[in-house]
Amino acid sequence: MKEIKKQTDTNRKRLIHLKDISYAYPGGMLVLNHMDLEFFRGDRLGLVAPNGSGKTTVFHIIMGLLKPLSGYIELFGSEKKEEKDFVDVRKRIGLLFQDSDDQLFCPTVLEDVAFGPLNLGKSREEALDISKKTLEFLGISEFENRITFKLSGGEKRLVALATILSMEPEILLLDEPTTGLDEKTRAILTKIIQETDISYMLISHNADFLYECTDNIFTIKDGRVINQGKMYRHSHDHIHTPSFLPDHGHGH
Amino acid sequence: MIKEPFAIGNSWIHRLDPRYKICFAVLFSVTVAVFEQFPSLVTALVISVCLACLARLSIKETAKRLAVVAGFLALVWIMLPLTYEGEPIFSIGSINFTRPGIIFAAQISLKSIAILLVFITLVATMSVATLGYALSALKIPDKLVFLLLMTYRYIFVIENEYRKLHRSAKIRGFSSKTNIHSYRTWAYMVGMIFVRASARADRVYQAMRCRGFSGRFFCLHEFPSHTRNIIFSVIMLIFTTCLVVLEIKTGL
Ligand SMILES: Nc1ncnc2c1ncn2[C@@H]1O[C@H](COP(=O)(O)OP(=O)(O)OP(=O)(O)O)[C@@H](O)[C@H]1O
Ligand SMILES: [Mg+2]
């Protein structure tokens, strides 16, 4: 079994604290209902819940893209309320959107990956350097000059990941990072995520991936986030695994 | 998919600095547009064909583009000789074909084909992205340039949404006929395309903000200097000057 490197509870720094958050889309029902969530430095958290239960919504609230109806948001130790409070936060948290088409908008891959670093105030040379390194790190250097919107779904996924990694964030919020990836690419991604020292929270419906990449599983029920605890092999039953798929080979 | 068939290539023309290509394409076109003499017009056409050969453009794709103009020119050839005042060259019944009309139509044809060829050769041999950066390097206002780049991106988005919707209608057995059901389906589709494209635009903007976008764009592109740009400029200047001299001489 791999060693889980995690600081002791006492010196863990709280990076995200959501308290009593309620949210409803305009004209819709309450998606989040007095929800609480705490996220610490070094956390590797999985968020697993049925479709439409509000996972993406939680991420967007953390990024300040959606404004909760009520509640308290504390990020990196200070309260965030208005749009201007979030400007800084967005530079420190990397959100991988559920749909890569939302994320990519520059004509070429390299430009898209360099967009973040340039916005962070890096010089052109630095930005190019970081971007090339990030692409290389993800093993997609050859995509450099390709047109972003002409990539395949899986290729877009990797490039989208590159665009947020190039900003060197302190927290990653990954919204279904493995969708559209084939076995091999998913294995590469799993390895990258396992090896990163960035704290992250990820949404996934893939039991194997969750098992390999997260220490702790949360779920959303009736608009609240619930800690499901550590993920063990025998806890697979609780995770959304389509019954028509063959057993993944996780004997008990 | 919107293709950029000419942008792919590695000819001498492709490797030129895009800024020079744009400048000389504009200079050549403006000059040729005011020409009236046939010797200079024919020479201009010959020059543009030579440039096209130099860029090793696909004959098939070029012909496709020219065919579009040919349709327009056919209209010119029908309309002008009939409607222009002047000495009739021949008549069918009471319909007169006038000499000035035919001359005018011939001028328009030569001009438009020469200009179109030069634009295909010099401007379409770069991707729209490069075009954008070259324009911004030529001090075209940033807002206009990014309007161009974003328009280009959203044409893809809209086209993609259209394809998805059309496909989903098709796989459910929809085939367009002249009946109310078809009209309604089309109306839904058009409506959905715009709703979806605008929702997409919102999300792309959110993603941009997440990557630190604050209203300022940064440009990654650099155009290294190379002697071929000088050679190209000299050649184009000589060509254009010769054309102007020829035009003035024959016009006297
Ligand atoms: N833009 C929107 N406008 C209105 N309602 C929305 C919007 N986006 C999501 N919803 C609703 O909010 C609820 C939660 O959506 P959310 O996208 O957070 O779900 P999710 O858990 O991420 O689901 P999935 O697993 O399918 O990605 C859903 O019931 C959805 O119908
Ligand atoms: Mg979601």
Image (cartoon, rainbow, N blue to C red):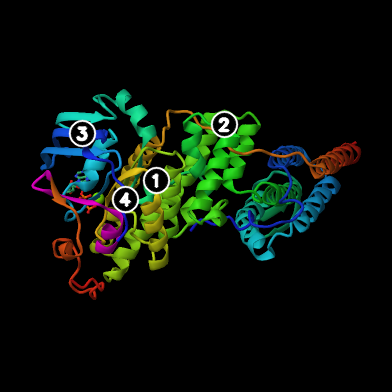
Q: Which callout, 1 or 4, points at the residue further toward the start of the chain? A: 4
The N terminus of chain A, quarter of image: bottom left
Q: Is residue A186 magenta?
A: no
Three-letter amino acid code of the residue under disc 4: Gln
Mark 3 in CB contact with mark 2 (< 8 angstroms): no
Q: Which residue is mark 1?
A: A103
Please name whichever residue, B79 or B89, is drawn nearer the observer in this view of the structure: B79
Distance of label 3 from label 1 (alpha carbons):
26 Å
Q: Which residue is mark 4?
A: A98
Chain at numbered mark 2: A
Instruction: Give the foreground label among 3 and 1.
Output: 3
Distance of label 1 from label 2 (alpha carbons):
22 Å
Q: Report which quarter residue B19 is drawn in.
A: top right
Residue B201 picture location, percent across and down: 36, 41
Distance of label 4 from label 3 (alpha carbons):
22 Å
Q: Which residue is mark 2?
A: A123
Mark 3 lies on a secondary structure that is: strand
Distance of label 1 from label 4 (alpha carbons):
9 Å
- Mark 2, Cα crowd under 10 Å, few <14 / some 14-19 / many 20+, is some
- The disc label shown at residue A17, or none: 3
Three-letter amino acid code of the residue under disc 1: Gln
Q: Is residue A208 magenta?
A: yes
Q: Is disc 2 on the same chain as disc 3?
A: yes
Please name whichever residue, A104 or A14, is drawn nearer the observer in this view of the structure: A14
The C terminus of chain A, quarter of image: bottom left
